[in-house]
């Protein structure tokens, strides 16, 4: 064997094992926008015990961002309290996001709300509906990919023991949305601004119904939050593998 063959063999041996983690790293180059729903001036829904939805979204958004970074997605960033909905999409676009995940917690149609007293204050609640929902817009430029990711999130939530909410379905009074996958809790919500205008795959996750008195308490538990965060991170991994050739 002459010198040039030897050096080629050496290069192959040295370069080949190095190529595997490099490819894995390239997959984790995915830029992920974590859009924390609502803000200081628009706090969203109010929970059965009077907590603003924005507080729930902030905690869940921070946990998801941290876990994604820990999982190797170093380009994950959060969008918190921007001027308006279009600004959220603009920030994601400017930062070249590959995936847009909007974090929300749910209420129900006003018709189902009742009053009760908590800590001496009258609050609204409904114990009729609980569960998560994952929303996509067919008007998103990358609808197919959005739906693919939404289904992965729904599947992981189911596997983790959570159940989908049905009150957005047209089958329920005041429900306005078509269920794209009833089993996985995936809904079509075409005109939701952030989903419609995002140029990258985009989903909105309602992690649970905070006007439901038991569900609110459960959603405040660290164990529940950690399970849901894990489900989302695993969905990102699965989504990523569909895009990246796995060596
Ligand atoms: Zn919301």
Image (cartoon, grey):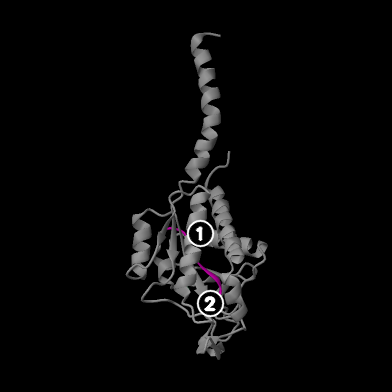
Looking at the image, which residue is at 33% across and 56% down?
A: 94
In terms of secondary structure, where does tag 2 sit? loop
Find residue 151 and report its image quarter: bottom right
Circle number at residue 177: 2
List the single residue furthest toward the left. 83
* 144 relative to 186, above or below: above
Q: Residues within 10 Å of mark 1 (few under 14, many from 20)?
A: many
Q: Residue 202 in magenta? A: yes
Residue 25, horizontal then vertical, whole percent: 49, 41
Q: Which residues are magenta?
A: 200-209
Q: Hey, which quadrant is residue 132 in on the image?
A: bottom right
Quadrant containing the C terminus in the rendered view: top right
Which numbered disc flags the more N-terminal residue, 1 or 2? Answer: 1
Circle 1 is placed at which residue position? 64
Residue 162 at what x, y percent from top left? 64, 68
Residue 162 in sight here: yes
- Specify whether tag 2 is near ligand 1 (CB below 8 Å): no
**Residue at point 51%, 27% (across, down):** 15
- Front residue of 82/242: it is 82
Given residues 51 and 203, the one toward you in this image is 51
Q: What distance separates the C-alpha of mark 1 from that of mark 2?
A: 27 Å
Q: Position of residue 55 (x, y in %)?
A: 46, 71
Kindly report the secondary structure that dominates the magenta region of the rendered protein: strand
């Amino acid at each position: 064997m002459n010198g040039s063959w030897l050096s080629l063999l050496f290069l192959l041996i040295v370069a080949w094992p190095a190529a595997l983690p490099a490819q894995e790293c390239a997959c984790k180059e995915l830029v992920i926008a974590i859009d924390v729903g609502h803000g200081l001036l628009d706090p969203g829904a109010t929970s059965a015990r009077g907590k603003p939805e924005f507080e729930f979204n902030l905690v869940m958004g921070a946990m998801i961002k941290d876990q994604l970074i820990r999982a190797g997605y170093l380009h994950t960033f959060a969008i918190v309290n921007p001027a308006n909905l279009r600004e959220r999409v603009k920030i994601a676009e400017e930062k070249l996001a590959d995936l847009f995940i909007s974090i929300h917690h749910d209420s129900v149609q006003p018709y189902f709300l009742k009053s009760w007293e908590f800590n001496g204050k009258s609050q609204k609640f409904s114990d009729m509906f609980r569960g998560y929902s994952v929303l996509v817009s067919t008007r998103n430029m990358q609808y197919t990919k959005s739906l693919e990711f939404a289904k992965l999130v729904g599947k992981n939530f189911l596997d983790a023991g959570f159940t989908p909410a049905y009150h957005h379905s047209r089958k329920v009074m005041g429900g306005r949305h078509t269920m794209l996958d009833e089993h996985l809790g995936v809904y079509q919500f075409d005109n939701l601004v952030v989903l419609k205008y995002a140029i990258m795959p985009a989903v909105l996750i309602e992690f649970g119904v905070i006007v439901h008195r038991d569900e609110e308490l459960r959603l405040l538990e660290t164990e529940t939050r950690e399970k849901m965060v894990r489900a989302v991170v695993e969905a990102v991994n699965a989504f990523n593998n569909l895009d990246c050739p796995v060596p």
